[in-house]
Image: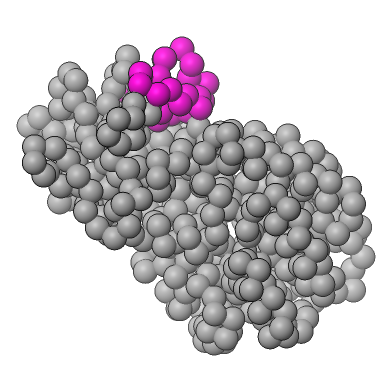
Amino acid sequence: MTGSSSAFVRHYKCPVELADFDIADDLCSEPAYFRFGDAICYGRTQREPVANGVAGFADLLDDAGRASGRPELPFDLCDVVANLREERYRRNTSRPSSIAELKAARRLYYLLRPLLPVRLRRHLQKAGLNGWSRIAFPRWPVDFTVDTIMDAAMTLRLKASGDGAEIPFIWFWPDGAPSCGLMTHDVETKAGRDFCGPLMDIDDAYGIKSAFQIVPEARYDVPDTFLEDIRARGFEINVHDLNHSGHLFRSREEFLQSAARINAHAAAFKSRGFRAGAMYRRQDWFHALECSYDMSVPNVAHLDPQRGGCCTVRPYFIGKILELPLTTIQDYSLFQILNDYSIELWTAQIAMIRARHGLISFIVHPDYVIEQRARAVYLNLLAHLRRLRDERQLWLALPRDVDRWWRNRDAMTVVRERGGWTIKGPDSHRARLAYASLSANRLVYRIDAGPGSPPVWHSASGGGVELRGQPPLVGQQSVPHLPIH
């Protein structure tokens, strides 16, 4: 199995023998941006790079072909996907991603932050984020580049297999759920800590459990009784940074020292997950963390102090750690940076991610929903999520549940048995067999709902089409797709 095939198999969890790809010979030695239909990519390609930024690059879609009956890609799929997920493309940026990334400015800001009034902090943050709306890549408000590339690879594989072909794979979410929702609360101040009890009451009123990320040092006291109350009520606790100083990734040596203390706090908190303060991150350093999953990487980080983004709405592995990316705007950015006290942007992002069968993850800080105006917006969001759960089968889960499911799915296999396909592995009773095929040259998914039940059809590229017993209508597509000619 080639590198490209392994990335494809791990994404779809399809049989290895149905996932072979050829990679063009003589790839360039240096990675560069290029286009593959609608998707902006970064990696080594068959052509010489034509640009160092994200403008003026070549479209390699027409370079994809077939060799010996197998699809041939003009790039290494595994390499390109890793470059996006792990934000390696940021190394080829001509200027700093934001003012906050300038070390001297960041140190000064965090030194003075406790003395600055909220209004002044907000002004400085807006200045640091100036020009965010003009950033071409990743795409705002949700970037699907990795998912689009995988869909394109599946389309190429099906075309190479001939008319009427379909490829079985393990559906992304348990029990055939079309998508997954995840609510998390980062507790930044003593006031936020003291509001955690009322916030749990609010979440419980809507039947939604959430995860609280607790800063273990410097910010506020963390009594054992506080942690035990969260656990006893069925909520989850994770470690949030070390002291939320903004310096966690300042140097590798300092990070390794901090990671040892973070790991000790995680053991004391009985935590399985971690999130860095302000979404600062170095994904290549995460291996020092003794956690099962991380939640520090945004899908698109235009409104975060560290720009970039992982360009996917599905979990992915960074070595042994599972990344659960943040796929929607944070409450602070919505309220304080955009001055938007509605759920319109959230609902737009939710609709886009649901249409691509992804992870819809949120950060809502207890600190910022104490105020009645912001709290009213949060209540509207919870009501919307409850409707999606009750009416649209959204799987609302805790991070530890998503971590357990995605790891078990990764350990499952699709095998032939008694003339058909079946799923083997841990938690396979919750897994659903799905089939990818082409309908009017568009990629569609069919989920086997079990004996006596009609299949459930989904559009792979968006539009929210969920029809039982018949394939999606092409005219109902509304989210941009990647055409394959």
Relative to 100, 262 lies left or right: left
Residue 113, horizontal then vertical, whole percent: 83, 71
Whether residue 253 is visible to the viewer of this picture, yes or no, is no
Task: Specify start and end residues of the magenta stretch as a single range.
Answer: 458-484
Q: Residue furthest front?
A: 452
The magenta stretch spans residue 477? yes
State whether the magenta stretch is mostly helix, strand or loop. loop
Residue 416, horizontal then vertical, whole percent: 12, 43
At horizontal 36% and vertical 61% (from top left) the residue drawn is 407
Residue 276, horizontal then vertical, whole percent: 61, 68
Residue 133, horizontal then vertical, whole percent: 69, 38
* Location of residue 239 by image quarter: bottom right
Residue in front for this viewpoint, 174 or 233: 233
Relative to 390, 165 lies left or right: left
For residue 274, above or below residue 386: below
Relative to 382, 260 lies left or right: left
At horizontal 80% and vertical 63% (from top left) the residue drawn is 198
Residue in front for this viewpoint, 39 or 372: 372
Relative to 333, 61 lies left or right: left
The magenta stretch spans residue 215? no
